[in-house]
Image (cartoon, rainbow, N blue to C red):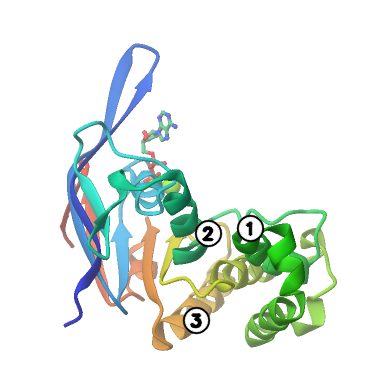
Amino acid sequence: MNDPILQVRAIHKTYRLGRVDVPVLRGLDLDVREGEWVAVLGASGSGKSTLLHLCGALDRPDRNGGSITYRGQSMSGWSTAEKDRYRNTTVGFVFQFYHLLPEMNVLENTALAAMVRYGRWGYSMRRRQTNQRAGELLEAFGLSQRLRHKPAELSGGERQRVAIARALMNEPQLLLADEPTGNLDAATGAQILDVIARTHREGQTIVMVTHDRAIAGRADRIVQLTAGRIVAA
Ligand SMILES: Nc1ncnc2c1ncn2[C@@H]1O[C@H](COP(=O)(O)OP(=O)(O)O)[C@@H](O)[C@H]1O
Ligand SMILES: [Mg+2]
């Protein structure tokens, strides 16, 4: 079996609400191996989004609250530039509510990931290749007739396919998906899971969180987040 690329060890994460500490993650361990699709199943409020934000270096654990290592490097030792590179290039995010920019069309929303990665100047140097890759991804997801449409002109399922294309734009080594079908009806959600499954067959490593056991069942492996820890599902 492949080595873990992501190792989450004894993670504690506590939010402070006024004067009250709210512990959410309490000694959580998780290994993610290259090429696998892991589903983290947990009730609403169990800390699934919190866990994904930590895995994506969008937030950090409590002080002395465990470690997260990516390919053997502890995130706690990363500089701001290293964190930016990880967030912009190594991982791709898919959220429940798409987070597309309303003023940009489908092609621009997808290519935006490259603009964030390379900066405005670097992007303009690569514009042709970038737009070509964005176009290919969108075509693979059945959106080639929608390239010039704005998000408001799309269905929920189409918006989420754009968001997945954007997440894959920079060929991330790890895809982090936060309830990617949570805002969609069952049939449309199933189509989105088919898109995700296809990227997985092509080798994409995926961590997906969901409260829905049937959706989790599409993954290679299901783990359960309960009381701030991972327990076998
Ligand atoms: N920024 C925050 N400040 C305070 N409490 C938060 C914050 N984010 C999440 N929480 C709380 O932490 C718990 C876990 O939240 P979350 O990770 O979003 O759970 P899930 O994604 O499983 O629904 C919830 O009780 C939520 O209210
Ligand atoms: Mg959540």
Horizontal side, residue 210 vs residue 125: left or right: left
Where residue 44 sits, quadrant-wise, is: top left
Q: Is residue 100 visible?
A: yes
Q: Are marks 1 and 2 in contact (CB under 8 Å)?
A: yes
Instruction: Determine whether the residue tagged by mark 2 lies in a helix, strand or loop.
Output: helix
Work out how far the residue at label 1 is from the one at label 2, CA to CA, in angstroms. Answer: 7 Å
Q: Residue at x 68, y 68 (%)?
A: 110
Amino acid under label 1?
Val
Whichever of labels 1 and 2 marks the residue nearer the N terminus, that label is 2
Q: What residue did someone put label 3 on?
A: 194
For the residue labelled by badge 3, is the local secondary structure a helix, a strand or a loop? helix
Residue occupying the point 75% across, 74% down: 127
Question: Which of 222 and 119 lies nearest the eye of the viewer?
Answer: 119
Residue of label 2:
88
Mark 2 and mark 3: Cα distance apart in space: 25 Å
- How far across and down, in percent of the image, does residue 29 sit? 17, 53
Q: Are marks 1 and 3 in contact (CB under 8 Å)?
A: no
Q: Is residue 155 visible?
A: no
**For the residue marked with disc 2, what is the amino acid?**
Asn
Residue type for callout 3:
Asp
SS class of the residue under badge 1? helix
Bin the neighbour count of mark 2 within 10 Å (Cα to Cα): few under 14, some 14-19, many 20 and up. Answer: many
Q: Which mark is residue 116?
A: 1
Which image quarter holds the N terminus? bottom left
First in sequence: mark 2 vs mark 3: 2
Q: What is the x, y in percent for residue 130?
A: 69, 76
- Mark 3 neighbour class, 10 Å CA radius: few under 14, some 14 to 19, many 20 or more: few
Residue at 66% over, 69% down: 162
Q: Is residue 33 above or below residue 44?
A: below
Q: Would residue 102 be found to the left or right of residue 114 on screen? A: right
Left or right: 147 with respect to 211?
right
